[in-house]
Every structure is written in C-alpha cells, then in structure tokens.
Image (spheres, rainbow, N blue to C red):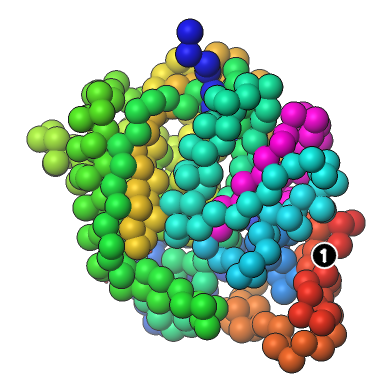
Amino acid sequence: MSLSIGIHDLSFATGEFVLPHTALAAHNGTEIGKYHLGIGQESMSVPAADEDIVTLGATAAAPIIARHGAERIRTVVFATESSIDQAKSAGVYVHSLLGLPSATRVVELKQACYGATAALQFAIGLVQRDPAQQVLVVASDVSKYELDSPGEATQGAAAVAMLVGVDPALVRIEDPSGLFTADVMDFWRPNYREAALVDGHESIGAYLQAVEGTWKDYTEQGGRTLEEFAAFCYHQPFTKMAYKAHRHLLNYCGYDTDEAVIARALGHTTAYNRVIGNSYTASVYLGLAALLDRSEDLTGRPLAFLSYGSGSVAEFFAGTVVAGYREHLRTDANRQAIDRRTEVDYARYRDLHEWRFPTDGGDHATPEQTTGPFRLAGISGHKRLYQAR
Ligand code: COA
C-alpha cells in the first residue's frame, strides 16, 4: 500500500508593518480601482528594518516546533528568492534560532516563486525513503521592486512553514505532477541588485504558458480531471493573477469561463494574499491556508495547486484534504499575524524600503522596530546577528 504523505501542519508569519494601497495610490495618482480591482490588492506587508527572511521564517516555524517537537525532523529545507547570503543557507540561522538538533541537514533552495514547491516535493521523497522522519519546509520571501515602478504595487513579505510527514493531518499530496520549464527572462535579480527586475506583462504571459504546459503534462501523466477539484490554489503575485490563470486553464480545456464558476473554484484562496501582497515562494501556500481556514468542510476533497516561478519552472499537482483537518488549523493565529501589523504611511514605507546595511564590514545595529519573537539585531564583520526574544 502506498504511503500517505503530505502537509501535517502549516503556519505563517508576515511583516511588522502594512501599507494600504490607498496610500500608494494617493502618492502616485493612480485610480484606486486599478489596485483594488485591476490587480486585486488591498494592502501589502512591509518588513521592519530588523526583520528579514530568517526572522520571518523562524517566526512561522516556531509554533510548529512548539506543537510537534523536533525529534522527527532531520531535514530543514529553506526556499527563498530573496536570499541574504550567496553561500550560507538562511535555514541554518533558523535552525539555530529554533534550537533544532545538530543531527539535521539544512539547505536553501531557489527557483523564483517555485522554490517552496520543489522543497515540498523533495521533502515527500525523503519521507518516502524513511517514513519515521519529518521535514520542515520553510518558504520565506520579501518581495521588493523599485520605488515608483509598476511592480511597486505588487510587493509584500511573508513566510510559510510546513511540516511534511506520513499520515498528514491537513493535506495528502498526490502523484502525479505536471511539470513545465522554459528559459524566459520575465523576472530576475542579478547578484548586485536588491530589487528584482521584471517585465510584468511578459511574466503574465509566461505564467499562462506554464499553466498550459503543466496541465498538458499533468493529464498525460494520468492526473485527475478538472471537474474533480473542489478548489484551485494558484501562485498569486497579485490575486487577480489567479483569476487570469484559471480563466486561461478553462479556455485551454474548452470550458466556458463563467465568472461565478471561477470565483467558486478559487474559493477563498485569495483572502490572505490580498492583504499581505506578494510573498513569492510562500504565496501559493498562503492561498492554501486561506482556503482551509475559510472554506466549508473540504474533507476528502481534491485540491489543485499551480506553482509558478519566473524564469521559469512550474508544477501542477493535487492534494486531498484529510478527515479531521479542521482541528489542526491555525485560523486564529493566522488572523492575528495579519491583524497585528502596524499601518504605515507612504513616507514611512519609503524609508523602510530604502533602509539597508552599509557594506563596509563595520558594526551596524538595526533600529529596534519589530515586536516579533525574533529580530535581526545588526551586522558585525559582515556577519548578521540574530536575537530570539
Ligand atoms: N479600475 C479597474 N481596473 C483597472 C483600472 C481601474 N481604474 N485601471 C487599470 N485597471 C486594470 C487593467 O485593465 C489591468 O487589468 P487586466 O490585466 O485584466 O487587463 C490591471 O488593472 C493592471 O493594469 P496594467 O495597466 O496592466 O498595470 P501595470 O502596467 O501597472 O502592471 C503588473 C501590472 C502586475 C504587470 C505590475 O504590477 C508588475 O509588473 N508586477 C510585478 C510582476 C508580477 O507580479 N508578475 C506576475 C507574474 S509572476
């Protein structure tokens, strides 16, 4: 009998601050309908100067360790595309902040917003090899574009932590997967840049190509039919993208694109992304969190996942919601992670956006801004210094 492997627990964290799109619109003279309806965003998380992918990742993962312990975790996979070091895995800092055992392998994975799905699939492979083990997957990103660029409205920050193991309490991940890779320059970040470069319209086209490509492969691999899925969790750089993607998939499969049907299929998957903004690798799993938290009972229902990472790599796969999953959700904590953010005005957001360490190798403390359990205290001799509170 094949093992049941999947997501046993899921927890997320987001930044200390939030910028409403009304403030951005007032600054740049954009009609607010473009943000609220055109791209489907209401606000975006902005990290404090003393937050980064490590503090967000540790904050997301800490409740999982508190609930399950770390005895069975022998691997930590940290997925990000806003990496803080070219050599050392951000996961090693998280491992240290969480006090995980030394008998652990830790690695960082990168392929734009697709990285967390690669991490999930690799984790399943490890669990298949030794079902006694669990894998901690951490997807953490700060989405940053140039000020006053079209991408500015699609920033955000969040981390999702998932515990992967046998007999999962939330979602059993299924075979097969539909895969698609194409060498395109729709979004990239050269080593010397902090903000990503993006051709936004090209990236939308490349994403839709990937929807077709992954679906074609998924069906060729003997996957489920479209009608079987209760809901579709898409990667959401902005929530309207999920609607574009699903409309495209329905068209590609020869179905009508009735807006009510599309809204039902996307269910509640956009609720968190709409107020958090783009969280790159974490985004598709924030979609899952919102769906599980807000939907009617989904027990036994198959869900579809479409993970897209610019550049580009994408995967379409399915998961089935496990009986009793509602008892394991973190709905209150998830709401709290969003509600605890402090609203900033445009000027404060701009200062936070432009904050960065000098690169002189000297000692530099960060201003104490975050109220979260972990902070980036400063840098000394080119080394980042983290604190657990
Ligand atoms: N009311 C309602 N909708 C409005 C509007 C208004 N007043 N003004 C514009 N819109 C709509 C547009 O019609 C368009 O909708 P459509 O895509 O369905 O045609 C949408 O708002 C966006 O307008 P657009 O002119 O295309 O915006 P833009 O040139 O500023 O670019 C992005 C939008 C998303 C491409 C840009 O923010 C970006 O580059 N983001 C980063 C890259 C990204 O997220 N890529 C996604 C794939 S990974």
Q: Estimate the x, y position of residue 233 in percent, counting from the top left.
A: 40, 39
Of residues 119 and 343, the one nearer the viewer is 119
From this viewpoint, is residue 72 visible? Answer: yes
Q: Estimate the x, y position of residue 213 in percent, counting from the top left.
A: 22, 45
| Ligand 1: image quarter | bottom left
In the rendered image, the vertical position of residue 49 relative to residue 79, given as above or below: below
Can you name the residue that lies furthest to the bottom here?
Answer: 360
In the rendered image, the vertical position of residue 129 relative to residue 276, given as above or below: above
Of residues 1 and 333, the one nearer the viewer is 1
Q: Residue at x 27, y 33 (%)?
A: 218
Circle 1 packing at 10 Å, graded few (<14), some (14-19), many (20+), is: many
Q: Does the magenta stretch include residue 77?
A: yes
Q: Name the residue beneath numbered marker 1.
A: 386
Residue 215 placement: quadrant = top left
Q: Estimate the x, y position of residue 156 in percent, counting from the top left.
A: 54, 63
Lateral position of residue 64 relative to residue 189, left or right = right
Q: Estimate the x, y position of residue 89 in percent, counting from the top left.
A: 66, 59
- Amino acid type at circle 1 is Tyr
Lateral position of residue 21 relative to residue 224, left or right = right
Image label count: 1
Per the rendered image, the range of residues in magenta is 58-80
Q: Which residue is drawn at 77% across and 50% down?
A: 95
Of residues 27 and 216, the one nearer the viewer is 216
Of residues 347 and 362, the one nearer the viewer is 362
Residue 260 placement: quadrant = top left
Q: Quadrant of the C terminus?
A: bottom right
Residue 320 placement: quadrant = top left
